[in-house]
Amino acid sequence: MKNFKKLVLAFLVLVVAAFSFTGCSKTSTQVEMEAMEGIREQNIQSIRAQTEQLSGLFLQATYDDFMMYKAQGAMIIGVTFDNDLASRWKAFTDAHGAVTSAVVDEVARHHYEYTGRIILTGEDNAQMALTVTYDKTGTPYKTTIQDYSDDSKLTFGERMAVAGGNTIIGLLTVFTVLILLSLIIYCFKFVNAAVTPPAPKKEASVSVPDKAAKSGPAKAVPAAKKEDDPMLDPALVAVIAAAIAAAEEKPVEGFVVRSIKRVKTNKWR
C-alpha cells in the first residue's frame, strides 16, 4: 500500500513538472513573438521616417533643382535609385506640373521587403502614387508611379456614375464574348463541310434489252401481275413440265419452264 502511494505521488510530481515546462515554453515563445513584432514595428517606423524625408524633398526642391544637384555629383541614396527617382519625378511633372503636396499614405512589409507610398498632388490638382521599395536592410532601391484617385472625396452621385460605368463596361464585355463564341460555333458547320469529302452519288442502273437499246430510249412498261396472266398458273406449269418429262423420258428436275406461249394450231410444240 505504501509503495502504491509513493507511485501515485511520483506520478503527480511528473504531471506538475510537465505542465510547468509547457507553461515556460509557451511563455518563451510568446516573448519571442512579441520581440519580433516589436522589431518589425520599429522597422516600419524607420521606413516611414525615411519615406517622409523623401516626400519632403518634393516640396523643398523642384525637378530642375534635383537634376542640378545630380549634375553637381550630389546623390540622395545611390546612382541607381536617383536615376529611378528622376524618371518618376519627370513623368509626374510632365503630366501635372510641379508637386504642390506630398503625403505619406501607407507603409507596409512584404516578406523581406518594405514599401512606402507617397501621394503626390500636381498643379492641376491631379494625384499620382509614388511607391518606394526598400530591401530588408531599409535601403531604397526602386520606385514605381501610377495614377491615383481618392474615392473618399467623391460624392454619392460620382460614385454611382463610376459604378454604373463599370457595370455597363462589364455587361458589354460579357455579351461581346458571348456573340463571338456564337459566331465561332456557327462557323464550325462550314469548316466541317470543307474538311469532309462529298459522298459519291448513286446512279440508277436500268437494264435495257439489246433491241430496245438499238431502236431508242427504253420506255417504262408496267410489269404484269401473275394473277392477271393465266399462262403463269403454277398448276398449269407443273402439268406441262410433267408432260414434257414423260415425253422425253427424263426426270422433271431436268426441265425449267421459263415461258408458256399458246400457238394457233392444236398441236403442242
Image: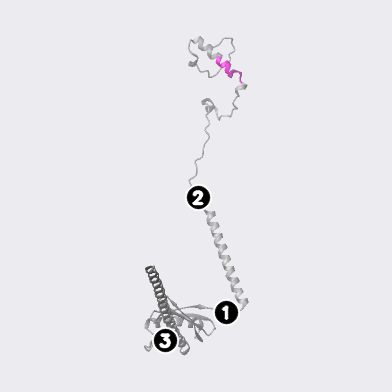
123 magenta-colored = no
Q: Where's residue 161, x and y in %? A: 61, 74
- Please identify the quadrant where the C terminus is shown: top right
Residue in front for this viewpoint, 135 or 149 = 135
Q: Is residue 215 left or right of residue 111?
A: right
Q: Secondary structure at mark 2?
A: helix
Q: Position of residue 52 (x, y in %)?
A: 46, 86
The residue under label 3 is which amino acid type? Answer: Met
Q: Amino acid at mark 1?
A: Ser
In terms of sequence position, does the residue under pointer 3 or pointer 1 come before the other? 3
Q: Which residue is at a point 60% across and 75% down the rendered structure image? A: 159
Binning the other alpha carbons within 10 Å of mark 2 as few (below 14), some (14 to 19) or many (20 upward) gives: few
Q: Nearer the viewer, mark 1 or mark 2?
A: 1
Q: Is residue 230 magenta?
A: yes
Q: Which mark is residue 152?
A: 1
Q: Which secondary structure lies at badge 3?
A: helix
